Amino acid sequence: MLSLLFLLLLSSSIAYAEPTPPLPGGPNYINIDVEKVHEMLEENPEQIILLDIRTEGEYNAERIDMPNVELKNIPKDVLENRIDELDESKTIIVCCQSGGRSRTASETLAQHGFVVYNVLGGINAWKKEKFATSTATPMPTQTPVPTLSPTVTPSPASPTPAASPSPITSPITTPGVPGFEVTFAIAAISMIAWCLLRKRRKA
């Protein structure tokens, strides 16, 4: 009786240490919790592909970070078309944000002959256990835009005073020089005076 009990305890401890294989009639992939995932990635990282089937935006925002592990991001919607990017000789661990999408992806991969493990709880469970995550790509550095110095607007020049119009000058008359009428009158008077003087002499 004691031997039977000991064998039962031993078998249960082995089952806890190793992921439970698929059951007949059940899913043909293996569900594992994040603690077991972390252990597998630490012990044998070269033989594992950690497949993140979230969108590229989700993957770039935050992902599982483990050294020496081959990380791949193939969104679930295009997994069937890109399945040849995966190495069939390696174990595939599939994760998503909460474990829902990864179940569907694990089923697809298992049908293609891959050895597949589905991460229960996904990235959310991974972070809850305080395991490391990181961003996939750094944010681009913003190049500072040079500040232009304010344009100095020249002050308006003082208006140039308009030149005062030249005064209209009257025709210059030379004093002492009589005009035509005056000269004619003097000549006429002289002629009359000469004629009168000549008559007197004849008389």
Image (spheres, rainbow, N blue to C red):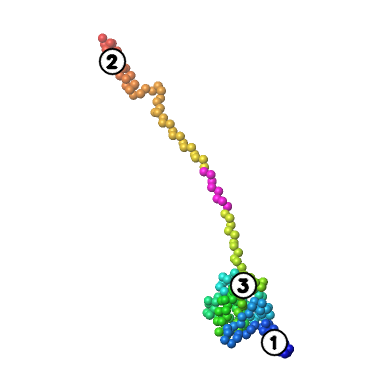
Q: Amino acid at mark 1?
A: Leu
Q: Amino acid at mark 3?
A: Asn
Q: Name which residue lies at 58% across and 83% down.
A: 27
Q: The magenta stretch spans which residues?
A: 149-156
On-image quarter of the C terminus = top left
Confirm whether the magenta stretch covers residue 151: yes
Confirm whether the magenta stretch covers residue 123: no
Near mark 2 (Cα within 10 A), the count class, few <14, some 14-19 or many ≥20, is few
Query: In the figure, is residue 8 to the left or right of 157?
Result: right
Disc 2 versus disc 1: nearer the observer? 1
Q: First in sequence: mark 2 or mark 1?
A: 1
Q: Could you tell me how far apart the alpha carbons at marks 2 and 1 are, in whole angstroms?
A: 181 Å
- Residue furthest to the right in view is 2
Residue under label 1: 8
Q: Amino acid at mark 2?
A: Cys
Nearer to us in this view, 181 or 65? 65
On-image quarter of the N terminus = bottom right
Total of numbered circles in the picture? 3
Q: Could you tell me how far apart the alpha carbons at marks 3 and 2 are, in whole angstroms?
A: 148 Å
Label 3 residue SS: helix
Residue under label 2: 195
Near mark 3 (Cα within 10 A), the count class, few <14, some 14-19 or many ≥20, is some
Nearer to us in this view, 114 or 26? 26
- Asked whether the beta carbons under mark 1 and mark 3 sit within 8 Å of each other, the answer is no
Residue under label 3: 124
Q: Quadrant of residue 108?
A: bottom right
Disc 3 versus disc 2: nearer the observer? 3
Q: Name which residue lies at 69% across and 83% down.
A: 13
Q: Quadrant of residue 29?
A: bottom right
